[in-house]
């Protein structure tokens, strides 16, 4: 009976006029805002006229509250007119869409809870269940709250008060994404097109793809025409088209597969479901991957940094990164006393007591030939002379990281050949320690304990080292980490001792709950905890690369070196969207002079491959061109390169991004100078990085939404005239560069060159 009833409604609806532009109320306006916390702020009668006006399209740090962490409230008074339902195709529910909120929210309508952290509130949630206990990356989650049209919490045609209680755990805070609105739910909102679950697969010379259409409604049948089209991204020419008439019953799914020829650029793909009789359509766009990095030759080639450094008497570990067929044997001439090479693996270990600079000649030999390359070994006070290259667990596994996942990553470095390109560190981020809700957190002597997912840290460190790799870990100067786990406050020396005993080579030290300890936001307070851990690290019998993470507060690049930092985060957390990549990557301007060997600006970890910040992962939401932009820009910026994806799911495209030795060489260049932004011309930006061999690497980025045909004026961009021009991604020489360097740059993409 029920089903028939709904089908009847559908038929009636479909014969109606177009519902393309249903009315909606814009909530991206100035709200009322106050810091602090009081339950009466939720009440409709509360007088908020003295509160500040606040935009909701930017974090509160960018709207006068820098820095502020902790509780705050937003309120908005708004009349919800019944015109919304009268003019809508579907008349069953109302959606209050609040965009993304950093980090956590409880949302009230007229004094009653309607949602928590993106989930519609059910009565059991009324007393704060998962409000601030959700994963920290909830700042990236949209908040759509849905109410039945006859829900008594809605006051139709009268003033309503939406009150949002926000808790910011550290770093950026508040309602921040813009695009907030109120509207009736649409038929197309029941329809999803998943183009992420099955990414493009390279098959022979082509690409294959499967997408999944699904009707999530348990009441409506959705009928319409489904179109897939693909255009060549640079020329706009159509290269593929398919159309199917489809009827999806309530709950029904349907898969579609198609093949494309492989191009030397992306194809722009659109999937459109045109819902019959409604004028409404669901449109999802996609871009196909393309591989530029040539296969490494079979002959041996030594890649990666040409310098490495260790303090006198501290353990040394360096693995010669070489591509070429195996078996391969290695030699090293001129090694200082105290170091030995394993000729079979290329791993050099030992300790050197004397300060000095040693010029070593490395040699790699296989059945196809042999090669040599110089390596400078510096024994002195400086370490980390090129940006660290490694993997970190956070952007993929978040707090769900465990020992097996870490070991699997280390093994993939070897099995997929990443170590042959210089990838070295395997770093555990937050989530290895005892959680704040468990006891005991430390043993009777005060040594920090790990949780059940990390039963034996020394064993883990040893197995990472046995592969010729280095081991990184994470803590906070506060009592708790950002994820709510035990941290190093008042145990710094002891924790540094534990890290050293486990064989740790790298520490990321994340501000987090130290915000509650610091007396104020002055520089001495910002620096204090970092000095404490610096001294602790310097007192142990290992070199530990010191990575400061405090989101750039107090312009950390100006004093990160003073507190012993080798690298420092310059911004809040990155996520796998173009907006995030663009705002973080292209803002690394002011900190440029502060990067140098031993000191690196850190615009956060890489967001290519399968990421997810928790147990379930998805392929990055960046398009292939955005990913080329990401790796090119991070290489030019001399940024630490920390892969943030599940290495076991590394696909051909991602591997191509991470193993281009000419691109990596730009990042690892001996000079260690960060690229400067030399041109901003509308959507085009040119960034230039001087190199140790006298050449210059430069990237021409197109931040716009259309292909750009651009001419770089070499002289204006400060490029030396008359050099040999090379396309670094394709590893192809393009002849002598004239003053006008012409190129077509795909939208959100880059052309990366070297001129010498
Ligand atoms: C902060 C940092 C992230 C990550 C998490 C762990 O948000 O900026 O990089 O380390 O904490 O909880």
Image: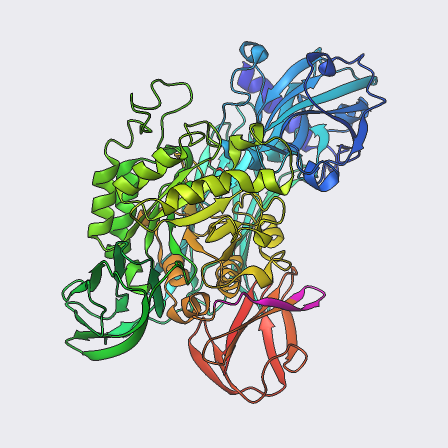
From where the camera sits, is residue 72 visible? Answer: yes
Query: Is 506 rendered above or below residue 147?
Result: below
User: How many numbered marks appear?
Assistant: 0
Q: Nearer the viewer, residue 290 or 344?
A: 344
- Spot occupied by residue 118 in the image (x, y as percentages of width and height): 58, 27
Q: Residue at x 52, y 37 (%)?
A: 511
Question: How is colour applied across the structure in the image?
Answer: rainbow
Q: Nearer the viewer, residue 492 or 225?
A: 492
Q: Residue at x 42, y 63 (%)?
A: 386
Q: Nearer the viewer, residue 725 or 28?
A: 725
Residue 165 found in image quarter:
top right
Q: Which residues are magenta?
A: 672-684
- Spot occupied by residue 132 in the image (x, y as percentages of width and height): 54, 23
Query: Is 129 rendered above or below residue 239?
Result: above
- Residue 449 is inside the magenta segment: no
From where the camera sits, is residue 748 visible? Answer: no
Q: Residue at x 63, y 24 (%)?
A: 145
Residue that extends furthest to the front in the rendered view of this protein: 354
Left or right: 187 in relation to 401: right
- Spot occupied by residue 309 in the image (x, y as percentages of width and height): 34, 62
Q: Nearer the viewer, residue 201 or 274?
A: 201
Q: Residue at x 41, y 54 (%)?
A: 200
- Spot occupied by residue 446 in the image (x, y as percentages of width and height): 33, 25
Query: Is 501 rendered above or below residue 756?
Result: above
Query: Is 345 rendered above or below residue 720?
Result: above
Quadrant of the frame with the N terminus: top right
């Amino acid at each position: 009976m029920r089903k028939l009833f709904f089908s009847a409604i559908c038929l009636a609806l479909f014969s109606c006029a177009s519902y393309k532009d249903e009315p909606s109320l814009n909530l991206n306006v100035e709200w009322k805002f106050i810091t602090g916390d009081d339950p009466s702020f939720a009440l409709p009668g509360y007088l908020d006229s003295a509160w500040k006006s606040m935009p909701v399209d930017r974090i509160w740090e960018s709207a006068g509250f820098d820095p502020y962490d902790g509780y705050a409230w937003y309120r908005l008074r708004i009349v919800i007119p019944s015109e919304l339902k009268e003019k809508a195709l579907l008349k069953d529910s109302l959606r209050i869409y609040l965009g993304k909120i950093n980090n956590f929210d409880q949302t009230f309508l007229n004094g009653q809870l309607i949602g928590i952290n993106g989930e519609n509130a059910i009565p059991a949630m009324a007393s704060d269940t998962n409000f601030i206990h959700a994963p920290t990356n909830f700042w990236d989650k949209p908040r759509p709250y849905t109410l039945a049209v006859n829900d008594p919490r809605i006051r139709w045609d009268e003033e309503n008060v939406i009150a949002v209680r926000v808790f910011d755990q550290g770093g950026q805070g508040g309602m921040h994404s813009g695009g907030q609105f109120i509207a009736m739910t649409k038929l197309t909102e029941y329809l999803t097109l998943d183009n992420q679950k099955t990414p493009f697969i390279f098959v022979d010379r082509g690409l294959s793809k499967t997408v999944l259409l699904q009707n999530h409604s348990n009441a409506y049948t959705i009928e319409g025409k489904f179109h897939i089209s693909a255009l060549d991204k640079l020329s706009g020419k159509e290269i593929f088209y398919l159309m199917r008439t489809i009827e999806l019953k309530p709950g029904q799914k349907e898969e579609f597969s198609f093949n494309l020829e492989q191009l030397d650029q992306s194809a722009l793909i659109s999937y459109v479901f045109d819902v019959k009789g409604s004028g409404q359509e669901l449109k999802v766009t996609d871009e196909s991957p393309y591989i530029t990095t040539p296969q490494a030759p079979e002959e041996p080639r030594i890649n990666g940094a040409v310098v490495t450094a260790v303090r006198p008497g501290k353990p040394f570990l360096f693995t010669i990164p070489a591509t070429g067929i195996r078996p391969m044997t290695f030699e090293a001439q001129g090694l200082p006393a105290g170091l030995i090479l394993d000729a079979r693996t290329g791993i050099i270990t030992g300790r050197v007591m004397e300060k000095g600079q040693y010029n070593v000649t490395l040699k790699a030999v296989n059945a196809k030939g042999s090669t040599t390359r110089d390596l400078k070994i510096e024994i002195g006070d400086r370490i980390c002379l090129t940006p660290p290259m490694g993997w970190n667990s956070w952007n993929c596994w978040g707090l769900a990281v465990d020992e097996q996942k870490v070991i699997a990553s280390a093994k993939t470095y070897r099995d997929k050949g990443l170590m042959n390109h210089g990838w070295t560190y395997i770093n555990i981020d937050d989530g290895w320690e005892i959680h704040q809700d468990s006891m005991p957190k430390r043993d009777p002597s005060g040594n920090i304990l790990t949780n059940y997912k990390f039963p034996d840290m020394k064993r883990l460190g040893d197995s990472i080292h046995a592969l010729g790799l280095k081991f990184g870990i994470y803590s906070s100067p506060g009592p708790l980490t950002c994820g709510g786990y035990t941290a190093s406050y008042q145990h710094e020396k002891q924790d540094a001792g534990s890290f050293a005993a486990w064989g740790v080579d790298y520490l990321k030290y994340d501000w987090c709950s130290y915000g509650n300890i610091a007396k104020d936001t002055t520089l001495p307070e910002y620096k204090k905890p970092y000095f404490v851990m610096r001294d602790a690290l310097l007192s142990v019998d290992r070199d530990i690369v010191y990575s400061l993470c405090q989101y750039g507060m107090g312009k950390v690049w100006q004093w990160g070196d003073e507190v012993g930092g080798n690298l420092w985060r310059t911004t809040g957390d990155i996520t796998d969207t173009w907006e995030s990549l663009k705002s973080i990557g292209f803002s690394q301007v002011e900190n440029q002079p502060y990067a140098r060997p031993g000191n690196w600006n850190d615009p956060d970890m890489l967001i290519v491959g399968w990421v997810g910040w928790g147990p379930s992962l998805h392929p990055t939401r960046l398009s292939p061109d955005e990913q080329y932009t990401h790796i090119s820009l991070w290489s030019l910026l001399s940024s630490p390169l920390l892969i943030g994806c599940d290495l076991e799911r590394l696909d051909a495209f991602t591997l191509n991004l991470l193993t281009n030795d000419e691109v990596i060489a730009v990042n690892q260049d001996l000079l260690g100078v960060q690229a400067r932004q030399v041109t901003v011309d509308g959507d085009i930006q040119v960034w230039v990085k001087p190199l140790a061999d006298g050449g210059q690497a430069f990237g021409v980025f197109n931040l716009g939404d259309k292909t750009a045909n651009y001419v770089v004026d070499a002289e204006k961009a400060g490029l030396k005239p008359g050099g040999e021009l090379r396309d670094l991604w394709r590893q192809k020489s393009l002849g002598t560069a004239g003053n006008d360097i012409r190129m077509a740059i795909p939208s959100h993409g880059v052309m990366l060159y070297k001129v010498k």
